[in-house]
Image: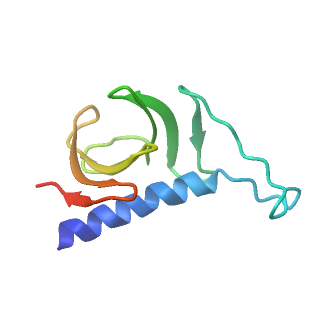
């Protein structure tokens, strides 16, 4: 149960990072906000926080890859695509294990 809670917290952190890039200056009041369009290779960071996201290709699909900056070993990241959400736990700066997957409009699975 603790692993599931950790995975959910990591997924929510990724969603929060994605929402943090939306403009909040009042010039784009509700109903008139223009979306920021990102392309593969683009990166965003959260002001004042050691976290950000990048648009990448993974297994042939475009994903929003969100994680903290710096050393990754022992931390979590999220990969969101048009079809699936994944939470990973980094074993090193280059190797990560998928700990949770969910399909939009479908099922969820905790990986062991």
Q: How is the image coloured?
A: rainbow
Q: Residue furthest front?
A: 105
Decide: is 4 above or below 89.
Answer: below
Q: Nearer the viewer, residue 70 or 103?
A: 103
In this rendering, would 4 be left or right of 39? left
Number of numbered discs present?
0
> In x, y percent, where is residue 40?
54, 27
**Rendered residue at 28%/48% (across/down):** 88
**Rendered residue at 19%/72% (across/down):** 2
**Rendered residue at 32%/28% (across/down):** 59
Q: Residue furthest left?
A: 112
Q: In the rendered view of the protein, which quadrant contains the C terminus?
A: bottom left
Q: Nearer the viewer, residue 82 or 63?
A: 82
> In x, y percent, where is residue 52?
52, 45
In this rendering, would 40 be left or right of 4? right
**Rendered residue at 49%/57% (across/down):** 15
Q: In the rendered view of the protein, which quadrant contains the N terminus?
A: bottom left
> In x, y percent, where is residue 57?
42, 27
> In x, y percent, where is residue 64?
48, 41
Decide: is 42 above or below 23.
Answer: above
Q: Residue furthest bottom?
A: 1
Quarter of the image holding residue 29?
bottom right
In this rendering, would 101 be left or right of 38? left
Q: Nearer the viewer, residue 87 or 84?
A: 84
Decide: is 55 above or below 15.
Answer: above
């Amino acid at each position: 149960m603790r692993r599931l809670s950790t995975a959910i917290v990591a997924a929510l952190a990724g969603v929060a990072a994605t929402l943090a890039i939306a403009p909040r200056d009042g010039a784009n009041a509700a109903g008139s906000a223009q979306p920021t369009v990102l392309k593969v290779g683009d990166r965003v960071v959260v002001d004042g926080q050691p976290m950000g996201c990048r648009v990448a290709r993974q297994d042939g699909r475009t994903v929003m890859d969100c994680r903290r900056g710096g050393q990754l070993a022992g931390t979590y990241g999220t990969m969101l695509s048009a079809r699936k959400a994944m939470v990973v736990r980094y074993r090193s700066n280059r190797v990560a294990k998928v700990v949770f997957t969910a399909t939009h409009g479908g099922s969820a699975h905790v990986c062991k």
